[in-house]
Image (cartoon, rainbow, N blue to C red):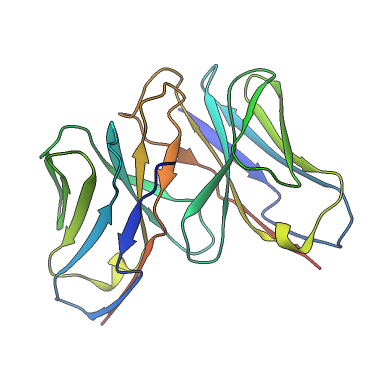
Amino acid sequence: TQLLEQSPQFLSIQEGENLTVYCNSSSVFSSLQWYRQEPGEGPVLLVTVVTGGEVKKLKRLTFQFGDARKDSSLHITAAQPGDTGLYLCAGVGSSNTGKLIFGQGTTLQVKP
Amino acid sequence: SQTIHQWPATLVQPVGSPLSLECTVEGTSNPNLYWYRQAAGRGLQLLFYSVGIGQISSEVPQNLSASRPQDRQFILSSKKLLLSDSGFYLCAWKPAGTGGRYGYTFGSGTRLTVV
């Protein structure tokens, strides 16, 4: 069974601080996706990383896929209150069903 | 453009009552469809997925079932709800055969409370 472990589970920081969220597994994934979810809404896709070692940037968010495709990280620079939410990593296995295995999520609170 | 509709948004049901949650996708054909359940502030657990009409795969044994009577319709059901069925249910779709490069598009979810 493929599992993804996210850390930390909760993060409360002040506006302007930097932070990193980690997503780790002992399994290899064909790709890894990051989602952000607001309370009472469905998750929204932020990025997909496919190649080992790949780095993608989305404004102040930097996503990295590990060389062995077993882990990923999300780094936010100069966090803002609008970044508050639940961040979820999700791995795709090798089957063509596209099933996503989700991590437990990281709840981020950015205080003004 | 493609859209996904999920209803109802909230539902309060007594223990032992039946359940039917519906999800429909517009603007695409033959999508892969998924039902997930989420505990408060936590990750998503895959319940069922479907790659075509009448094709349902179950991920975990449970009190729930799913059906896909039409290409873009996915239904989650239960004959008798348990307290443990409470949670936030999410429907999602992605284009068929796109592997891991395409993300899911999620519906807005149904908050189910079994009392």
Which residue lies most toward the right here?
B16
Q: Residue at x 24, y 62 (%)?
A: A21
Q: Residue at x 82, y 54 (%)?
A: B81
Residue B110 point in image, percent of width and height: 65, 53
Residue B100 point in image, percent of width and height: 33, 29
In this rendering, would A59 be left or right of B114?
Answer: left
Q: Is residue A14 above or below residue B84?
A: below
In this rendering, would A37 be left or right of A81?
Answer: right
Residue B77 point in image, percent of width and height: 77, 41
Q: Residue at x 49, y 64 (%)?
A: A39
State the quadrant of the C terminus of chain B. Answer: bottom right
Q: Nearer the viewer, residue A51 or A35?
A: A51
In this rendering, would A108 be left or right of B62?
Answer: left
When asked about the image quadrant of residue A73, the answer is bottom left
Q: Is residue B30 above or below residue B57?
A: above
Q: Is residue A35 above or below residue B53?
A: below
Q: Residue at x 58, y 30 (%)?
A: B25
State the quadrant of the N terminus of chain B. Answer: top left
The count of marks equals 0
Residue A110 point in image, percent of width and height: 28, 76
